[in-house]
Image (spheres, rainbow, N blue to C red):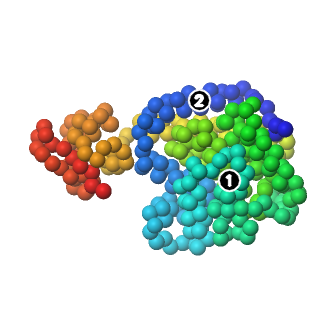
Amino acid sequence: MRPPYEITPDILKFIASISEKIGEVNAKYLNKQNPQLRKQNKIKTIHSSLQIEGNTLSQEQITALIENKRVIGPQKDILEVKNAIEVYENVSDFKSVSEKSFLSAHKILLSGLVQNAGSYRRKGVGIVKGSVIEHIVPPHENVPFLMRDLFAYLKSKDEIALIKSCVFHYEMEFIHPFIDGNGRMGRLWQSVILLEKYPVFEFLPFETLISKNQSKYYKVLSLCDKQGKSTLFIEFMLQIIDQSLEELLNYKGRILKDIDRIEYFMAGGENEFSRKDYMSLFKEISTATASRDLKKGIELGFFEKEGDKTKTMYRKRN
């Protein structure tokens, strides 16, 4: 049975815009496997998703943990980040239509933070805002078959992945299948669904925009609860995805400083290259600017220089 929602003109408009942008992003990015952009995405995604849940660690501290450096902070926050790093580093291993895979992701994400991580709740809960009960969730006895129905919907071929990802996110939040971690699982699984269909979502930290629009995110969830359908949430999330794609497309269009260009170049391309190779990635810069960049790269220890004049070659240092 399909969960209740309607296809509105706004939903159609956002799907058309997203589809157009995905084509443009594919042309710009997927032929350049950029580890630096992928790493930045992972850091932003983890930071934004956990910040919504009250985690206090900064992007710099998350970066340090990814690089296996020591970080000082609340042990719970550090463990949350370490768990999230493990999940997002293996995100492509999860299968969106597999309930077993879904529970496995929750077990990793909440390991050491709650009892029975990776299992559905076995008691009733309510979502309280201040002194007001915001949402009465379904009885725990209903959770297994409600989630089974939701995964059956995911397997359906009758709806496109963009809409299914939003519907799953909302319906999972409504069912509230876990004692803790429902918000981050809803956002994670939407990413998993989208990543299977559109590999470009590996470069897309749309959770950053959810974090920036956090009050609206919760308001829309609440409105959908009252209306008994996820239409408004689908519109909201598609707009978030559309904005995220727009930001990604502007990533290369922004004004880059020399260090930005050097770091971007270091993230991809050949280990040995010429000034001409460097300029082929940054077509808007002059030969003089390219030479200054490369000189700075040598001074900073990024490159080594061999040869002279027209025969000059550069080699990346690991």
Q: Where does residue 274 sit, x and y in percent of width and height? A: 22, 40
**Amino acid type shown at disc 2:** Ser
Of residues 5 and 212, which is closer to you in this image?
Answer: 5
Q: Is residue 233 visible?
A: no
Q: Which residue is mark 2?
A: 19
Q: Where does residue 252 sit, x and y in percent of width and height? A: 41, 38
The residue located at (27%, 39%) in the rendering is 278
Decide: few, some or many residues near mark 1? Use Cα within 10 Å; few <14, some 14-19, many ≥20.
some
In the drawing, does residue 239 fall left or right of residue 288?
right
Observer-side mark, 1 or 2, equals 1
Quick one: which residue is furthest to the left in this view?
308
In the drawing, does residue 224 fall left or right of residue 76?
right
Decide: few, some or many residues near mark 2? Use Cα within 10 Å; few <14, some 14-19, many ≥20.
few
Of residues 153 and 172, which is closer to you in this image?
Answer: 153
Q: Where does residue 92 sit, x and y in percent of width and height? A: 57, 48
The residue located at (73%, 39%) in the rendering is 155
The mark nearer the N terminus, 1 or 2, is 2
* Label 2 residue SS: helix
| Above or below, comparing residue 271 to residue 57 in the picture | above
Q: Which residue is mark 1?
A: 101
| Above or below, comparing residue 176 to residue 75 in the picture | above
Q: Is residue 121 visible?
A: yes
The residue located at (33%, 37%) in the rendering is 281
